């Protein structure tokens, strides 16, 4: 068959859906509890969902499901698109990497089948962005069959998954991406010199505080600022693809690159969750020149889930200098750094207020939070930001902390902290030292408790 490399045709395979107890239907999601995919002879990797270059399949759970369910039957030949995830970023990163085959196979099949999420099992319940993506890819919804029950399909074309979240983009897949019809229109567009992809509409659910100050500075420097969620998919892709220099805040918009070939521009990435590596993995496979800043603390004191928590930069000036050194910021204003830092901190405090209000954080928690924030600001100015990470219980296994503790003990660190706040730091250090399985040696734990005692007795 012409143009059908990386596609297998199966006769009468069983298609296993997602369920409320498995796959993305399980809450919280457990990648060791996946059963969805194809049950057929050959046990090919394309029959399963890929994540981190590994097969997501629990064969024992799948066997239990197959033993307890009878199969529906679906006649005709169909194209398999795999699992569907409602979240926009994960939809792009985990549900779109088989759609490349639609252009070559649409004349051979009756339509496509998708393994829908249990919370949106039918098209009428799909999120608007899912509908928009299918429309954008010219896959008519009338030709989509939602699989939410064990189903035997008469004939099934199974394309390989060209990329996966936190894993590799296959070389052959980059060639397949070039065949997407929308790329012809995108390539005709005028290049954008400098683009900033903002999360300013998400100040209360997952953003680095204070970045409004950076946006204002970048506008003066000639950047185009976009809030991608306000634009049609084609316009989002067009602007990202045609940017010569692009700055991303960490967020789902980075996954637009899943649908684009390798880029010729340069990218700078501002992270808000240092332990989340999948964005850098993707960026490094799409750009030759990737720069990033990730020295941040994630707020975990208020109880907001980490994905929606506010984050704080270690040093706003360091971010600015890195942008300058890598030629993402061209201003030569000698007062820039001093003025920026002050303005950034004002914006940061405004974001704090917005965060408290939108998340309805109670007054008592806000007061304790602000006390810790004040400590963090003092530590940040005096280059002891590592210790500030424990103020909000952020990344308590941070490996440089013991060295930082040792250095602090040799300085007049305790003189930097107002007396009323020393007990807070002392308590946090003791909690950290007493935690099991956080990778610290007995000596390191001793140093933490020694500093805690010093802080507790200092005047």
Image: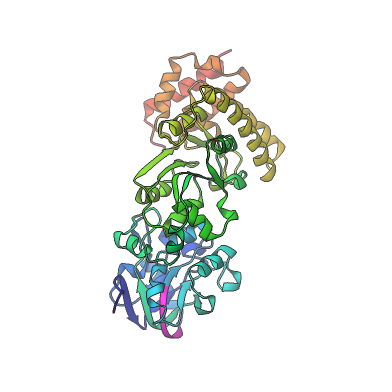
Quadrant location of the N terminus?
bottom left
Residue interval drawn in magenta: 69-80
**In the image, farthest residue toward the right:** 363
**In the image, farthest residue toward the bottom:** 75
- Residue 422 falls left or right of residue 366: left
Q: Residue 376, can we see it?
A: no
Percent across and percent down for residue 430 are 50, 28
**Nearer the observer, 148 or 250:** 250
> Number of marks in the image?
0
Q: Residue 250, can we see it?
A: yes
- Residue 186 falls left or right of residue 3: right
Please tell me which residue is depicted at 54% across the width and 68% down the height of the picture.
Answer: 118
Name the chief secondary structure element in magenta.
strand
Please tell me which residue is depicted at 38% across the width and 36% down the height of the picture.
Answer: 439
**Nearer the observer, 128 or 193:** 193
**Nearer the observer, 152 or 209:** 209
For residue 397, which quarter of the picture?
A: top left
Percent across and percent down for residue 453 are 51, 19
Q: Is residue 295 above or below residue 233?
A: above
Q: Is residue 423 above or below residue 150?
A: above
Percent across and percent down for residue 35 are 42, 68
Percent across and percent down for residue 431 are 51, 32
């Amino acid at each position: 068959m012409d143009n059908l490399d990386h596609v297998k045709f199966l006769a009468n395979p069983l298609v296993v859906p997602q369920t409320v107890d498995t796959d993305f239907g399980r809450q919280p999601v457990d990648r060791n509890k996946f059963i969805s995919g194809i049950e057929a002879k050959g046990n090919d990797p394309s029959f399963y969902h890929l994540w981190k270059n590994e097969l997501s399949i629990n064969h024992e759970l799948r066997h239990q499901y197959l033993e307890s369910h009878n199969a529906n039957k679906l006649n005709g030949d169909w194209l398999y698109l795999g699992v569907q995830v409602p979240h926009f970023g994960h939809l792009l990163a985990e549900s779109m990497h088989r759609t490349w085959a639609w252009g070559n196979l649409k004349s051979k099949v009756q339509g496509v089948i998708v393994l829908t999420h249990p919370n949106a099992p039918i098209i009428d319940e799909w999120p608007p962005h899912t509908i928009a993506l299918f429309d954008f890819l010219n896959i008519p919804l009338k030709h989509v069959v939602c699989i939410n029950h064990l189903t035997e399909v008469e004939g099934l074309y199974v394309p390989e998954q060209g990329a996966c979240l936190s894993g590799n983009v296959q070389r052959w897949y980059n060639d397949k991406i070039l065949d997407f019809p929308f790329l012809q229109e995108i390539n005709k567009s005028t290049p954008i010199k400098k683009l900033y992809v903002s999360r300013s509409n998400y100040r209360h659910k997952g953003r680095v505080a204070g970045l409004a100050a950076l946006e204002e500075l970048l506008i003066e420097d000639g950047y185009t600022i976009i809030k991608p969620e306000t634009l049609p998919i084609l316009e989002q892709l067009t602007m990202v693809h045609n940017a010569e220099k692009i700055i991303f805040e960490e967020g789902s918009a980075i996954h637009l690159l899943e649908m684009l070939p390798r880029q010729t521009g340069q990218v700078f990435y501002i992270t808000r969750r240092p332990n989340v590596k999948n964005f850098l993995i993707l960026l490094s496979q799409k750009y030759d020149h990737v720069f990033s800043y990730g020295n941040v603390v994630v707020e975990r004191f208020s109880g907001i889930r980490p994905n929606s928590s506010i984050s704080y930069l270690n040093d706003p000036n360091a971010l600015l200098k890195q942008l300058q050194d890598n030629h993402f910021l061209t201003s030569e204003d000698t007062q820039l750094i001093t003025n920026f830092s002050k303005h950034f901190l004002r914006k940061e405090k405004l974001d704090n207020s917005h965060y408290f209000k939108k998340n309805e954080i109670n007054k008592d928690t806000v007061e304790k939070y602000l006390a810790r924030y004040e400590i963090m600001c003092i530590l940040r100015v005096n280059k002891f930001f590592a210790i500030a990470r424990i103020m909000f219980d952020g990344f308590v296994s941070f490996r440089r902390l013991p060295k930082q503790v040792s250095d602090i003990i040799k300085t007049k660190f305790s003189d930097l902290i107002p007396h009323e706040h020393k007990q807070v730091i002392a308590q946090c250090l003791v909690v950290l030292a007493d935690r099991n399985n956080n990778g610290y040696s007995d000596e390191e734990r001793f140093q933490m408790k020694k500093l805690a005692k010093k802080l507790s007795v200092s005047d």
